[in-house]
Structure formats: C-alpha cells, structure tokens
Image (cartoon, rainbow, N blue to C red):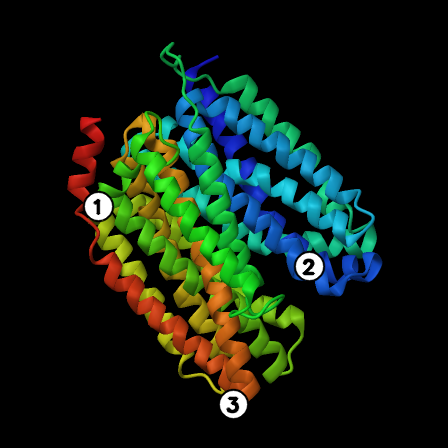
Amino acid sequence: MEKTTQRKMVTLAILVSILLVAIDTSITTTAMPHIVQQLSGLNLLSWVFAIYLLTSSVTTPIYGKLADLFGRKSVFIFGILLFVVGSMVSGMAQTMDQLILFRGFQGLGAGAVIPLTYTITADLYPGEERAKMQGVFSSVWGVAGLLGPLVGGLFVDHISWRWIFYINVPIGIVAILLVFSFFHETSLEKTKKTIDYWGAALFAISMGSLLLALISGGQMYAWVSVEIISLFTVAVVFLLAFLVVENKSSEPLLPLSLFKIPAIAVSNSVGFAASGVLIGVAVYMPIWIQTLLGHSATSSGLTLMPMSFAWTLTSTLAGRFMYRIGSKTTAVFGATLIMAGSAWLLLIHTESPYWYFVGSMIVIGFGMGCSFTPLTILVQSAAAWNMRGAATASYTFSQSLGQTVGVAVFGTVFNNTMNQSGMAQGLHVVFSLVFAISVVTLLISALLPSHRGILAHENAD
C-alpha cells in the first residue's frame, strides 16, 4: 500500500480517537441528570467528572514518556483499549459508586489518547503540513462540543443513558484496527529500555494529591481542614522527591531539560493560563444565562456554541497561516482576542442584551483557536523525536492542571462572594478574575521565542 494512503488511514484513526475522547465529556454532562435520577447519589455527581479528570491528567506524562521509549503505536493502542473497556463497564454500572470507579478506569485510557494523537501527527507530518493538520485536529474539539449534547440527548430520550458509554466500544475498535493495520513506525533502537518506576510513582502521588485537594477543597472539606492541608503537604513533599529522582534518572519520566527550552516552558505556561480562562467561561456563563436571565439549559448551551464554531474555524486558519506570519504573532494575536472577549464580560449586567453574551463567546473562541494551535506546534518543534511524546504530554497536562486549578479558585471565590453579596456579584467577581488571567495569558505569550528560531531547532534535530 502506498505511503500516502497509509498516512491518510492513520490520520483518520487519529481523528476518530480525538472525537472519541473529546465528545465524552459533553455527552456525559447531558445525560448526568437522568443517570443521577436512576442511580441516585446526587452528592456524588461532581466526582463522576472529577475522577476522570484526575486519572487522565496524572497519567498523561507517563504515557508520553512510554511512547518515547517503546514507540507510539503500542502505547496508543493500549490507551484506546483501556478507554473502550472503561466505557463498556461504565455503561454497566448499577450504582454511582461503581460509575465513579469505572470512570476513573476510563480516564486511565484517555490519558494516553490525546497526547499521543498529537505526537503521532507530529511524526507523520513535517513543518507546515503539521500545522495545518493540528488545526484540523483542534477543530474536532469544537465539533465534539456541538455533537455531544445532541447525541447524549437522543440516547437518553430514545434508547438508554448507558449507550453514551457503549457507543465508544465500536468506535474505539475501529480506531484500534486502523492504527494496528496502517501505522508503521520506524524500528526503535535495540537497546535496553529503562522505565522510571520511581519517577512515575512519585509523580502520580504528588499530582494525584494536588488535584484531589483542588477538587475537594471548599466542597467535601474546608480549605483549612486537616484533610486538604495534608493533601497539599503530600503533593509538595512527593514533588520535591520526584525532582530529585528525575535529576538522577537515566531515562526520566519527565525530562527536566525540556523546561530549559523557552518554547516549551512558555507554551506550557500559556496553555495553563488560557485553560483557566476557558473553564471559567464554560462553567459560569451558563449559570448567568440560566439563573439570572431565566433562560433554559438549551439556551445557555446555544450561547456557548458560537465559541465552538469560532474555535473550529480559527484553529484551521491558524494552522494554515502561522508559517506565513509566525507562530508567535499568531499566538499573541489569539491571546489578545482572549483578553478582549474577557474584557467584554466585565460589561455585562442583568439588563444586557443576549447578543452581548454571544459576542463575547465568539471573540474568546477566535482567540482560543489562534492560540492553542501554534502553541502545540511550538512544543513539538522544539523537542527531538525521542522527547516529543514527553513534551506534548507536558503541554496537555498543563492544560488539564490549568482547568483544575481554575475550577477550584473560581468555585471558592464564587461561593464566598455569592454568600455575602448575591449571585450577580459573585459572577462579576469570577469574570473579573477571568479577565485578570487573560491579561496574564497575553503577557506570557509575549515571551514566546521567535518562529524562525523554533524551526531552526526542529530542522537541526
């Protein structure tokens, strides 16, 4: 079979895999009210999502390093397989406790899928072609944001909520078969591979404790409780131990030398901050629409939909034009739009017209699309092949961590302000914080190295 045909089939498998994971969150969100009603356990609702975020985030860097050591193909197939099995047993759950457990297992697979899809893309497509394809892949997230609620609603209303998980099984099997049949890697050097078991364990405990503290703080336990303080302490102690081990390891899980590369360090920081803006808008804009304006859940979903459209469009355009105007210019322009859209949120009030909300979502969506695509390319271009998986995984993890920290900070600020001053004031404070983070996003973006410098580094490797 021609090499071009093989590449097209592998690309199709990657697109299917991204859609598989990307649509999972939005489709699950739609079905959760019905699931809670059937399985009971409303107080456990947030943990259905939190445990998935926890396991997928913690394992992302581990999978990235394993892909560098043993090749992308086997690790990628293993991740999809775990995700498919996790989806199947999640659909079979009989209690909320079981569903939470199985969602955690599903997240173990998701932790491999997203970073590996981008890493494989970087291996398949050089230079400007890669930028165009990353734009296409980024747009899949926008499509998933549109399809998820619709598909989830159809399953719940006409079949069963369990099919929001079962549908992943045949799709996942197709992705596995495509990758297994058409993805042929260059033979890896026949040397003894050393797995950084200590590093993986210390990282998992440290980040797991940190994310668990952020997710639980202010909800299950008070921020100053013994439980939360203990979790933060464990996170810091094991992080320090992890850094010591990584400095001595011959094959570190997360090579610290990566963060000495300006493109990777700055891109990860931008991704962390921008993800905080994104989660703040995605969580609290619907609250304003439904609670203060009295609109339906469907209406609030339609308010966020233009952001998905704008993100999809500009992701594709950014991938095509960043090699002409420069990746730094594209990313800074995107950060500027994110800040402009966030500033618009500061102007809204209870009498604001509906188009205010739609307009701000469009501007932020344009900014996200212009920003995230070049950041991904910069990270991958700055790393050599044998570190590309770890580099991509570090960027993916920074985004997950940004969302988790954002949820924790915004939740605490919102609850405290709302209790003292009311719903509207609480949301205004959140949006003010979102704007402040968007300013930080722009300032960090300005520190990105030049586009030509990154290309020179990539070509040298």
Seen in the picture, residue 273 relative to 129 is either above or below; the reply is below
What's the amino acid at mark 2? Answer: Thr
Q: Look at discs 3 and 1 and give the one toward the viewer.
A: 1
Camera-side residue of 430 and 138: 430
**Residue occupied by mark 2:** 30
> Disc 3, disc 1: CB below 8 Å?
no
Q: CA separation, marks 2 and 1?
A: 40 Å
Query: Would residue 413 appear left or right of 270 to someone viewing this image?
Result: right
Task: Indicate which disc, 3 or 1, sits on the residue closer to the N terminus.
Answer: 1
**Residue occupied by mark 1:** 262
Rendering coords of residue 164 (x, y %):
72, 47
Q: CA separation, marks 3 and 2?
A: 28 Å
Q: Quadrant of residue 107?
A: top right
Query: Would residue 184 appear left or right of 175 to someone viewing this image?
Result: left
**Residue 50 in sight here:** yes
Measuring 49% from the left and 37% from the top, which residue is drawn there?
Answer: 201
